[in-house]
Amino acid sequence: MKPWKDRALPPVLFGIFAASGFCGLLYQMVWLRLAYAAFGIITPVLSVVVSVFMAGLAIGSWTGGRIAERLAAPKRFSAIAPYALVELLIGVGGLAVPVLFAAGQTALLPAGPSDSFAYMAKSGLVLGVSLLPWCICMGATIPLMMKFIRQVDRTQTSGFSFLYTANVIGALGGTLLTAVVLIERLGLHGTLRVAAALNFSIAALSLGLNALYRSRYAKPFEAPVQAAAAVAAPASSGGLRAGVVLAILFMTGFTSMAMEVVWTRAFTPVLLTSIYAFAGVLAVYLLATWTGARIYRKHLRLGQVRGLPVLMAALAAFTFLPLLAGDPRLTVLSLPIAAELILAGIFPFCAALGYLTSKLIDEISQGRPGAAGRAYAINAAGCILGPLAAGYLLLPAAGVRISLILLSAPFVIVFALTAKALRSARPVLAAAMAALVVLLFIGAAAFFVSYEDPGFFKDGVIRRDATATVISYGREMRKRLLVNGISMTELTPVTKCMVHIPLAIREEKPGSALIICVGMGTSFRSAASWRIQVTGVELIPSVKAAFGYYFDDARQILRSPKNRIVVDDGRRYLRRTEEKYDLIALDPPPPVEAAGSSLLYSREFYRTAKLRLKPDGILQQWLPDWDDETLAAAAESLCAEFPYVRAFGSLERWGIHFFASSTPFAMPSPETFAARLPDGAARDFTEWNPGQTPGQLYAVVLKKEIPMETLLKPGSVPALTDDRPINEYFLVRRLLRGPDVFTLRNIR
């Protein structure tokens, strides 16, 4: 790596590109969250957003490279001028995407259920139109900046790794600051405005550099003829043909992104479902990638770059470490230690990938933006297909352990093909690495386990689909439902109260109920006992399929034309249905801090639900656990949309039932409540409390009313909204104020 002619320029360009990477990850995180709110918290939305993002990078990298190679020696601008333009467009896109999502959301309401082909195709089209132009601009940034580096200093042949290192460290900062600080303090739209302002600042600074370096370096600018010749003769890597290098880049992109999808499902039981867990995994991934790229840059400077055989040997071994670290039996060490082991397990693999990617694209491009753009585009193409293959083929068919073994196979195969060269140069290292790979492969195939493996949960029934892995296990009243290894619910009379109490509030017999988040199906079954029209909405197909595990009469209930379970996002179902209900009951998956959970507690959600209630209908909202501010924010959002709200503690002294309506309502006496229950509903209500009457059970809840004024904090806590999901983003607040927890003293 030759020194720069102008030593003042590299730190400036590094800072610019780090800021660009910061904005890129910020946009990806916020756009994904906005897409969930607009199109549903469903796997296809995640897959399409990630795929469109990577497709934009691929297209932008390829076309940006072609444009950069054809830039003439200018009189008025250098290559950093079009770079400034794309940064400006990225900032415009950051502000435009929410508007485009809102328009697309309305247009897609008639498209049918979220698991229908029509909806998935049309939502994919809307997401592509909304995101692709700005992602293409992001992809064009590397080749355009590489062109500027070549214009300033023709001797530079490692421009890609320089920019890649800056971009990754910026992305790391974007991940952490967005998740930990910006969204919590500024909201989603405020965070987008910060990124857009930063993009506009980058554009202005780049135009300033254009003016400075156009006058200083006009003569050395490369001519188009030279650039075209460079594109025609790309360099190879270590004697390998360019096609082989590009195939390796595609393979690493495919497998690494596919593994990231599998890791997310495999590690959920340990890392849990919070925003901070996801951000932590992504941060470790980026930190490891930056570390690998940084080590490569150091080796490049010292002339000690590692060869492909050594790197493939390392990757072949490192690919098994996450599977070893994620073995659920290690949770006996305590969850924090198990989480640290998992994060440590993915670090070596990601670092080796960062090293390899930087090395291969540097060597194949030799600083030429066209060749680098083409190579990076092929790597990004692998990144598009990897998550789709993992989410829709590997995980449903094979599960996490077999999927990870299959994804490790390409690295083992390439290692085997290059082992001869390594054995000739370093025989001891070759033997040691081969032994390690064989040992880890045998361990992965025969000894490591995942929570999905048959027998890990005794007598468990495992169902997998593109959305989640669902495990049903236990007997009688100890049956449990796990989604991706997380316990969602249990058989408890609390879930019966969510339906029976609000259905009995009105004097007139109810005619319909909507149950959002079916879970085990207890609330759905309880509503069916009223002999009314009952619709259940469940996000995960395998959860619907598990209904019969928990209740012997499930098939009989679903045979009735009055009862149905729809696979859809609950929020989206409310938007697209025209039906109105006497009751809407929802029990969002715990914990209350779970990623995406605020979309079922927000003011916008309640505004939509209110439109689907009959004039005197009741909404029942369950809040399982809380801190003072989360409880106040959730209560504020409910009260902001419904003028009449009451709150009650549960039968089992955990969680709160909120009952809300647009018209006044009075809680019936225990005697009146019992009289309003049909015979089947009365039997269902007391099913798990033999010896007690419906009136006695209801009286326990009735005595636990919580005055709403004790829950609200007017002026100090904002209502929970789509823009301010404060139940999910709370770290700064808790660090500053401490975990002020609302106790059960008010409801005993």
Image (cartoon, helix red, strand yellow):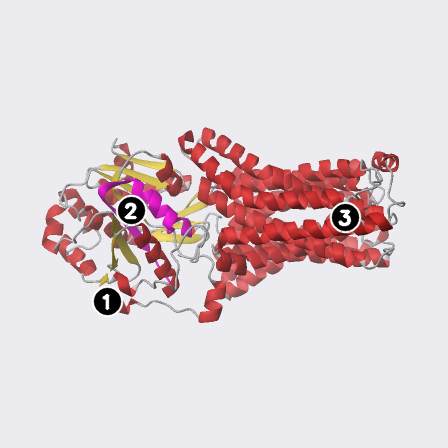
Q: Of label 3 and label 1, which has the lower sequence position?
A: 3
Q: Is-magenta flag for residue 605?
A: yes
In the figure, 338 relative to 117: above or below?
A: below
In the figure, 197 relative to 40: above or below?
A: below
Q: In this view, does 33 lie to the left or right of 371?
A: left
Q: Is-magenta flag for residue 662?
A: no
Q: Are marks 1 and 2 in contact (CB under 8 Å)?
A: no
Q: Is residue 741 left or right of residue 378?
A: left
Picture coordinates of residue 173, whole percent (x, y): 62, 58
User: Callout 1, which amino acid?
Assistant: Arg
Picture coordinates of residue 526, whole percent (x, y): 24, 45
Picture coordinates of residue 368, whole percent (x, y): 81, 42
Q: Could you tell me which residue is drawn at 47 percent across and 36 percent down?
A: 103
Q: Of label 1 and label 2, which has the lower sequence position?
A: 2
Q: What stretch is highlighted in magenta?
A: 598-626
Q: Which of 177 and 86 is in front in this view?
A: 86
Q: How far apart are marks 2 and 3 (CA)?
A: 54 Å
User: Callout 2, which amino acid?
Assistant: Ala
Q: Could you tell me which residue is drawn at 58 percent across and 61 percent down?
A: 341
- SS for tag 2? strand
- Camera sees residue 585: yes
Q: Could you tell me which residue is drawn at 37 percent across and 35 percent down?
A: 576
Q: Which mark is residue 585?
A: 2
Q: For mark 1, what is the residue? A: 748
